Amino acid sequence: MKTKLRDQVIQQLEADLAGLTKAAAETHSVSTGDENKQEGKYDTRSIEASYLADAQAAQAKTLEEGILKLRNLSLTDDPDTAILGSIVILSSPSDNDDHQYFLLPAGGGTTLEYETIPLTVVTPESPIGREIIGKEITDQLKDTPIGTVYVSEIY
């Protein structure tokens, strides 16, 4: 099940990468084309397009690295603590609202659906990811973006 969910994240990142790679190639082409030829000493269109192409290329590299990390991630079936590859359910003591998170090295912010409940991918660098990693069942988390919650399940 986790493998299938991880593969969905990889597919999304690969689609993002394909779009970004195409955009970077187009931006690079524009930055070196005649339409962006400098028309005066204060004309910076070509330089700005070049900066944009460089930023897009850097983002593409980050996506490629994330995809590689996801492909190489070993998924453990029932870990005792929240580790990379864990699905963690946080429950609120004040209401019956549960939040499901998939702790992965890349793809943060991606929303999947598992058993008709939204599952949000978080990375250890995110605020909620920093709070979750290393926690055990029944551990309480305070001052999270979703309020005070406790770890109800890890799988």
Image: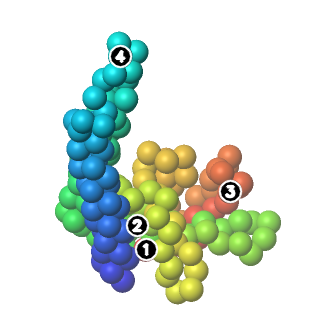
**Residue type marked 2:** Ser
**Residue type marked 3:** Ile
The answer to which of marks 2 and 3 sits earlier in the sequence is: 2
Would residue 119 appear left or right of 93 to someone viewing this image?
Answer: left
Question: Going 36% across and 68% down the picture, which residue do you hit?
Answer: 12
**Residue type marked 4:** Gly
Contact between marks 2 and 1 (CB within 8 A): the answer is yes
Residue that mark 1 sits on: 155
What percent of the width, then of the height, locates residue 11?
Answer: 31, 71
Residue that mark 3 sits on: 146
- The picture quadrant where one finds residue 84 is bottom left
Mark 3–mark 4 Cα distance, whole angstroms, equals: 53 Å
Give the class, few, some or many, for how many residues have Cα within 10 Å of label 1's Cα (few <14, many ≥20): some
Residue that mark 4 sits on: 40
Task: Tell me the SS state at disc 2.
Answer: loop
When the figure is inspected, residue 134 is found, relative to residue 29, above or below; the finding is below
Residue that mark 2 sits on: 86
**Residue type marked 1:** Tyr
- Determine if residue 90 is in view: yes
Give the class, few, some or many, for how many residues have Cα within 10 Å of label 4's Cα (few <14, many ≥20): few
The answer to which of marks 3 and 1 sits earlier in the sequence is: 3
Contact between marks 3 and 1 (CB within 8 A): the answer is no
Front disc: 2 or 3:
3
The answer to which of marks 1 and 4 sits earlier in the sequence is: 4
Question: Going 37% across and 29% down the picture, which residue do you hit?
Answer: 45
